[in-house]
């Protein structure tokens, strides 16, 4: 059996070679992860993606020529099968919001350890979201600050059922379909159906789009 096919194939995108080399060193001994390419900016990454198809792109935000946010938008549009994990020093809520809206399924900071990086890689590649604790705190603080009477419920433009609201709330909290099913005492198949309905109603392409929608519209109050 060729175990190479079972590995998570990763493209590294960062304008600092020392960072790319460091990530390569961290990941080279991981039996189920393989770095298959590296790029120094977003434009370079798109050129590489025309030749290879990784499972995941790990990308910085601030880069010359084309930044990570612009690149993520293009990847979602032209290479939708490639998952996106932001790895950056930027912890401002504006960057977080824009990167998630662009299609990133995960966002971790460069002060994260190897163990968290590995977890983030596997989680985002599986189609779930992963945010480091500091990033989650920033997201939640922003939701609380902007809370108003109209943001305590889902916006009027897209009416959702109470069950869909429950599902979306748990998606934002990074619960897996299995965990959501256990919390709500329903089947995983039912959760899948509600998730598909949410994607269709909101017009999102993936789970990251659902999180971005909830984040941008401040859909839940701090005590929900």
Image (cartoon, rainbow, N blue to C red):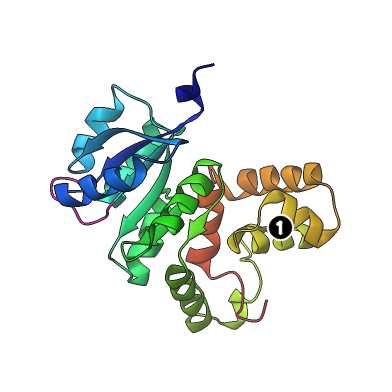
129 in relation to 4, above or below: below
93 in relation to 80, above or below: below
Query: Please, what is the dominant secondary structure of the magenta stretch?
Result: loop
Is residue 16 visible in this depiction of the protein?
Answer: no
Q: Residue visible at 74% across and 50% down? A: 178
Number of numbered tags placed on the structure image: 1
224 in relation to 118, above or below: below
**Which residue was labeled with disc 1?**
167
**Magenta-drawn stretch contains 63:** yes
Left or right of 168? Residue 77 is left
Q: Residue visible at 51% across and 50% down? A: 209
Q: Where on the picture, by quarter, is residue 107?
A: bottom left
Instruction: Magenta stretch: give its range.
Output: 60-66
Is residue 151 visible in this depiction of the protein?
Answer: yes
In the rendered image, residue 113, in percent from the top left (x then y), is placed at: 38, 61
Residue placed farthest to the top in the image?
A: 1
Label 1 residue SS: helix
In the rendered image, residue 157, in percent from the top left (x then y), is placed at: 61, 60
Left or right of 35? Residue 80 is right
In the rendered image, residue 185, in percent from the top left (x then y), is placed at: 86, 57
Q: Nearer the viewer, residue 206 or 26?
A: 26
167 in relation to 52, above or below: below
**Magenta-drawn stretch contains 2:** no
Q: Nearer the viewer, residue 130 or 206?
A: 130
């Amino acid at each position: 059996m060729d175990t190479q096919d079972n590995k998570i194939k990763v493209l590294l995108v960062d304008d600092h070679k020392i960072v790319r080399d460091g990530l390569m060193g961290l990941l080279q001994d991981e039996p189920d992860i393989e770095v298959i390419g590296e790029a120094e900016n977003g434009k370079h990454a798109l050129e590489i993606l025309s030749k290879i198809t990784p499972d995941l792109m790990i990308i910085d935000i601030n880069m010359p020529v084309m930044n990570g946010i612009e690149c993520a938008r293009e990847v979602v549009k032209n290479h939708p099968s490639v998952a996106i994990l932001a790895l950056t020093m930027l912890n401002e809520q504006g960057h977080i919001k824009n990167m998630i809206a662009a299609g990133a399924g995960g966002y971790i900071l460069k002060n994260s350890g190897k163990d968290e990086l590995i977890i983030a890689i596997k989680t985002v590649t599986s189609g779930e979201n992963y945010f480091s604790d500091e990033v989650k705190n920033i997201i939640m603080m922003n939701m609380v600050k902007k809370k108003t009477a109209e943001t305590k419920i889902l916006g009027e433009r897209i009416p959702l059922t109470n069950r869909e609201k429950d599902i979306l709330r748990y998606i934002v909290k990074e619960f897996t379909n299995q965990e959501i099913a256990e919390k709500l005492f329903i089947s995983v198949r039912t959760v899948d159906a509600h998730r598909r309905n949410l994607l269709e109603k909101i017009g999102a392409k993936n789970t990251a789009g659902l999180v971005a929608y909830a984040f941008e519209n401040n859909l839940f109050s701090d005590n929900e």
